[in-house]
Image: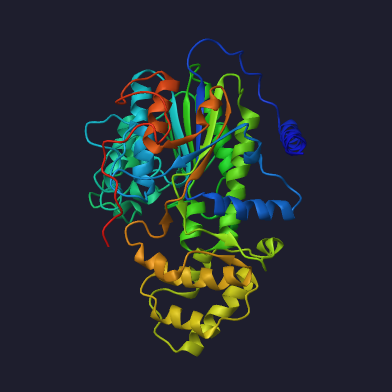
Amino acid sequence: MRRFVATGIALLLLGACAKEAAPPPAPKPVPGPPNVVFVVGDGFGVGAWTLARGLARTRGQELALETAPRLGFLDTRAGDALVTDSAAAASAWSIGELVSIHHVGRPGAEPLGRTLLRAGRPFGFVTTARVTDATPAPFYGTVSDRWDAEEDLVPQLVEARCTVALGGGRERFVGKDGGGTRRADDVDWLARAEAESIAVQLQFSDPLPVDRPVIGLYAAGHLPHELDRTEEPELADMARAAIRRLRAEGRPWFLLVEESHTDTACHDHDGPSVAHDGLRLDRAISAILCEVDLDSTLVVLLADHATDSPAFLEWAHPESLDVVSMSVERMETRIFSGPWRGTPRALEAKALPVLDEGARQTGLTSGDIDRLLVAESGYDRRTALGDAISRRLGISFIAYEDHLASSQVHGHTGELVPIRAWGRGAEAVLGIHRHDEIGRWLREVLEVGGAAEAGMESAGAAESTAVVSPPEG
């Protein structure tokens, strides 16, 4: 029975590919390394996958990600903690070594993207986050703390001259005089990039320039959640454009594709956005599988970690996820402009019209109101609103108290997450692996050096030299 279901899903995927304008046929595979598309669903553990799957099935759809012929699992620990953050996970993929949480790369270790570029291989990435955020950054740069030194990654990205880099984060590239809010040095790095013959795009277009490197910045900060997206590009379209740009170089290439907001939505306990952002990730997978030749390309999908353990409860109604039209993040912004200074009744009067518009939520419990009144940050307010909406839809997350106590990684959890793979070399993902093993395997597949050792082995077969222990506090 499973075999017939898998065959049916594969046929549906092929039908979806046929509906798109067919690109020129890819050349037959030749000896040498494959192209690699490395897809990351940030925080996209089994719970987030389940929510996306539930929404898809109420629409009569199947997920492209479930067509993967090879499935393994990832032990997500960091170098100094049982539960990782995105920076440590992506650093391990890039350099092949476990590092401490919040670290972007390691001084003296060359990032994978720079290794590829130095070897003459095209390298690029696409993200719905800022291009300097924790997942893409370790592939081209190094800083000691993702939170305190993100602005230092901007000149490193410009200097790296990635073949293509698409996402958000425009405000990080210019000082206050240029409309930015984050840079202390007031250097216009967009002008600096253009002076270095890098094409800078502020509006998405397809195709991308092929005569020089491209940096596309399509939002001041992160791109929005799928529920809030208007004129911003679709992740699938950015991934497709990036593949065609890399392919134009005529050499084996590497592309990182990240859906960042599956993690953000889990942090906010925003079940509907988890599902909708998960479907955005799945559309990107579908577009990638339609675009590449799997005889000469390896496609990998994994998560850096799981976040806040979303789950359907027995009274859940997945079809209600389609009733919601606005993320918790957008609703919180519309209700609050800082800590609440009025009465509980005034707060309820302001919140309910927004909640009704965004989620058809027509009431809040006294406990919800109390949490919103004492919330000290937007993060706390979003979690309170997310719990109120998700509870009504039959979706649970880890307890609020445990979420707050998770001070280092803010609700990340340490369960195994799936690794899926298609195409050339996909069988290597079978088994259980660590982040650093994935990083060494990528270097082996791509036939470039720089890791301490190559290949993947079972997480139990060799102990890392790093000390792994729970974070203090």
Give coordinates of residue 422: x percent, y percent.
59, 29
Residue 185 versus residue 108 in the image, above or below: below
Residue 35 versus residue 178 in the image, above or below: above
Q: Residue furthest front?
A: 461
Foreground: 428 or 59?
428
- Residue at 52% in and 70% down: 387
Foreground: 88 or 23?
88
Q: Is residue 261 left or right of residue 131?
A: right
Q: Residue furthest top?
A: 31
Give coordinates of residue 84: x percent, y percent.
36, 49
Residue 336 versus residue 20 in the image, above or below: below
Give coordinates of residue 371: x percent, y percent.
44, 79
- Residue at 49% in and 82% down: 367
Q: How many marks?
A: 0
Q: Is residue 370 left or right of residue 291?
A: left
Residue 253 in view of the camera: yes
Give coordinates of residue 341: x percent, y percent.
39, 84
Q: Quadrant of the N terminus?
A: top right
Foreground: 136 or 8?
8
Classify residue 103 by image quadrant. Answer: top left
Task: Give the colour scheme of this rendering.
Answer: rainbow
Q: Quadrant of the C terminus?
A: bottom left
Foreground: 51 or 331?
51
- Residue at 37% in and 71% down: 377
Residue 388 versus residue 188 in the image, above or below: below
Residue 194 in view of the camera: no
